[in-house]
Image: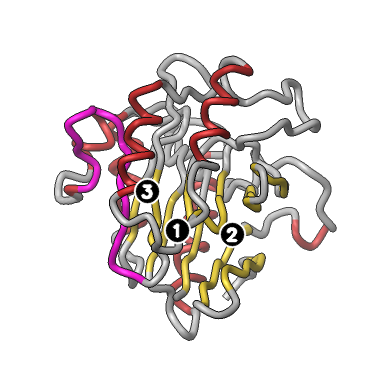
């Protein structure tokens, strides 16, 4: 099983770098389409657009129409749940009785659970008791199936940056961490948000954080030849070997 993860495209209209953000996203989709073998699924782990506006989502949707495989979306701190649902009306998984964009993808040997950590009006994440209950319910629905979790906000301290804590409070972060660790079936976790590549753990669960697709917003040091190259992640699952991940650099085709 192959998963392509993209994140933090931050599509904006009218900013000085708007065209480059669009082109970074387009180039990434072109690169995914060139992969052989093709991914079974593509996950966008949030901050699809910059301001949560419908015109921004329309631009993002036009880009994603070109991808060969199925795309599953999640919300980041810059996204707007209502406008996301309006922009992608055919994606039934975006709707839920709770109002949160939390769901599972159960069609593959590795089950994928997508979490909603959006806290409207804040860059920091939230994980209320309702969302914790939803995660527990999703995991317990098939407790022995190997599972990977996708969430926008990293569940640990990231020391580089203006604020190392990416949830509203340490108590909320601890609720998130303890809920994720309830089941031994969770083999890995994948995030975005901080615009840099970072690795860590939640207990014994490895967590990998990918850089942002938008190269003008990316943080960290890169060789001169890579400063304008989008970067995304490929995750592979094998029942015998578990999950492995690799960095994919988007070069000019």
Q: Nearer the viewer, residue 141 or 68?
A: 141
- Residue 133, position in %: x, y? 34, 31
Q: Residues within 10 Å of mark 2 (few under 14, many from 20)?
A: many
**What is the distance, in whole Å, between disc 2 and disc 3 at their CAs?**
27 Å
Q: Residue at x 28, y 43 (%)?
A: 58
As displayed, is residue 97 above or below residue 216? Answer: above
Q: Mark 2, mark 3: which one is toward the viewer?
A: 3
Q: Secondary structure at mark 2?
A: strand
- The quadrant of the picture occupied by the C terminus is bottom right
Residue at 41% of width from left, 62% of height from top? 42
Q: Alpha-carbon distance for marks 1 and 3?
A: 8 Å
Q: Percent x, y for residue 238?
A: 52, 78
Read off the magenta span. Answer: 93-108
User: Where does the N terminus fall, quadrant-wise?
Assistant: bottom left
Residue bearing the label numbered 1 = 147
Q: Is residue 195 above or below residue 29?
A: above
| Residue topped by disc 2 | 232
Q: Secondary structure at mark 1?
A: strand
In depth, the one of 198 and 11 nearer the eye is 198
Residue plotted at (39% across, 22% down): 129
- Distance Cα–Cα, label 2 vs label 1: 21 Å
User: Residue 141 at x, y = what percent?
Assistant: 28, 51
């Amino acid at each position: 099983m192959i998963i392509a993860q993209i994140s933090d495209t931050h599509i904006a209209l009218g900013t000085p770098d708007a065209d480059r953000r669009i082109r970074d996203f387009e180039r990434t989709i072109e690169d995914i389409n060139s992969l052989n073998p093709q991914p079974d699924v593509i996950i966008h782990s949030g901050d699809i657009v910059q301001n949560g506006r419908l015109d921004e989502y329309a631009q993002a949707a036009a880009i994603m129409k070109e991808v060969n495989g199925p795309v599953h979306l999640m919300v980041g701190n810059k996204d707007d749940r209502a406008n996301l649902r309006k922009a992608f009306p055919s994606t039934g998984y975006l709707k839920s009785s709770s109002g949160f964009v939390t769901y599972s993808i159960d069609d593959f040997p590795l089950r994928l659970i997508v979490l909603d950590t959006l806290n409207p009006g804040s860059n920091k994440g939230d994980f209320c008791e309702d969302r914790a209950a939803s995660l527990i319910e999703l995991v317990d629905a098939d407790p022995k199936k190997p599972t990977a979790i996708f969430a926008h906000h990293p569940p640990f301290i990231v020391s580089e940056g203006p604020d190392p804590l990416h949830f509203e409070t340490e108590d909320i972060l601890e609720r998130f961490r303890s809920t994720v660790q309830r089941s031994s079936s969770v083999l890995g976790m994948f995030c975005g948000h901080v615009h840099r590549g970072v690795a860590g753990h939640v207990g014994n669960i490895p967590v990998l954080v990918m850089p942002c697709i938008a190269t003008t917003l990316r943080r960290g040091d890169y060789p001169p030849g890579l400063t304008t190259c989008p970067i995304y992640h490929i995750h592979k699952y094998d029942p015998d070997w578990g999950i492995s991940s690799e960095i994919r650099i988007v070069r000019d085709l």
